[in-house]
Image (tube, rainbow, N blue to C red):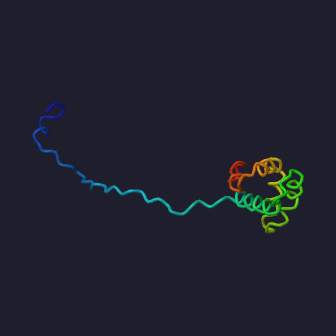
Amino acid sequence: MAGFCHDVADQPLVPTKVIPAVKLVKAIQAKSQPQESVQCVVCQMLIGKIEEMIADNKTKEHIEEILDKACSLLPTEYSAECKDMVHSYGPAILDLLLAEMKPKTICCALGLC
């Protein structure tokens, strides 16, 4: 054999360590859905509440009025988050509501879900 010493070339090769074959197993996927962020939940609650309140009067002025009041109708633990959302996204929420989009679609369009 080329590259071996003559003494070793005549000896059979014996492994010093035997490694058992690894059994391949398919990865198990988690079945639980990721939790929605607080912003997503608050946004959907806010938009849902506004939609209930505007009913058939979907004018810009009426929606603006309701945007100012809607946060007070949500659970108190979401009040601050809601007010921040209305302050930051009010004009966009107004436009998307006038376009008659669904709450989840609106919140996704705003990057909150």
Name the one closer to the observer, 21 or 32.
32
25 relative position to 90: left or right: left
38 relative position to 18: left or right: right
What residue do we see at 36% from left, 57% from top?
A: 25
Q: Residue furthest left?
A: 10
What residue do we see at 80% from left, 66% from top?
A: 74
Q: Position of residue 58 (x, y in %)?
A: 83, 54
Total of numbered circles in the picture? 0
Name the one closer to the observer, 20 or 43.
43
Name the one closer to the observer, 79 or 8.
79
Location of residue 92 with respect to 74 vertically, above or below: above
Q: Position of residue 9 (x, y in %)?
A: 13, 38
Q: Which quadrant of the figure contains the N terminus?
A: top left
Q: Position of residue 19 (x, y in %)?
A: 27, 54
100 relative position to 60: left or right: left
Q: Which quadrant of the figure contains the C terminus?
A: bottom right
Q: Which residue lies furthest to the bottom in this view?
A: 75
Q: Position of residue 33 (x, y in %)?
A: 57, 61
In terms of image quadrants, where is residue 86? bottom right
In terms of image quadrants, where is residue 104? bottom right
Q: Which residue lies furthest to the top in this view?
A: 2
In terms of image quadrants, where is residue 70? bottom right
